[in-house]
Image: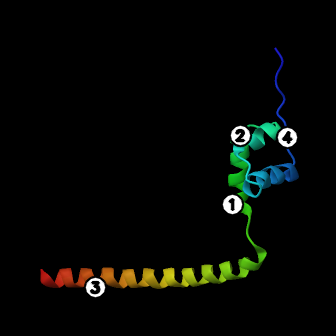
Amino acid sequence: MSKKRRRKFTKEFKEEAVRLIAEEGYSYAEAGRNLGVNPNLLSRWKREFEGIEIDPGNAASMQAELKRLRKENKRLKMEREILKKAAAFFAKEQE
């Protein structure tokens, strides 16, 4: 009984395969047949590359947005704590 060896694909091969699907309009099945790769594998590669791709020009605006959201989050947490204390104060006062 012979074991199948696991094939290894280069990053360039994976990127090209994903490009065929995303830009050229090939279906997963069609691209898989042409490349000799399982369509499920192509789908996984596409999901992986979608998570990685970030436009370098957009990175600065994303950092600014992240900073703004963190500041807003901090302010909202402080407001929530104040409201909790006020609710506890008024609940105690009504007793």
Toward the viewer: 50 or 1?
50
Q: Which comes sooner in the sequence, label 3 or label 1? A: 1
Which three-letter amino acid code belongs to the residue tagged 3? Answer: Ala
Q: Nearer the viewer, residue 42 or 8?
A: 42
Q: How far apart are marks 3 and 1 (CA)?
A: 43 Å
Residue 80 rendering spot, x and y as whole percentages: 38, 80
Q: Which amino acid does label 4 sit on?
A: Lys
Q: Residues within 10 Å of mark 2 (few under 14, many from 20)?
A: some
Seen in the picture, residue 17 relative to 51 is either above or below; the reply is above
- Secondary structure type for disc 4: loop
Residue carrying label 4: 8
Q: Which mark is residue 86?
A: 3
Residue lying at 19% horizontally and 80% vertically, measured from the top left: 91
Q: Are marks 4 and 2 in contact (CB under 8 Å)?
A: no
Read off the residue under disc 2. Answer: 29
Left or right: 36 as drawn, with respect to 46: right
* Between marks 2 and 3 in the image, the one whose residue lies nearer the viewer: 2
- Location of the N terminus (image quadrant): top right
User: Which residue is drawn at the image coordinates 44% and 82% (left, top)?
Assistant: 76
Q: Say whether disc 4 or disc 2 marks the residue closer to the N-terminus.
A: 4
Q: Is residue 8 left or right of residue 66?
A: right
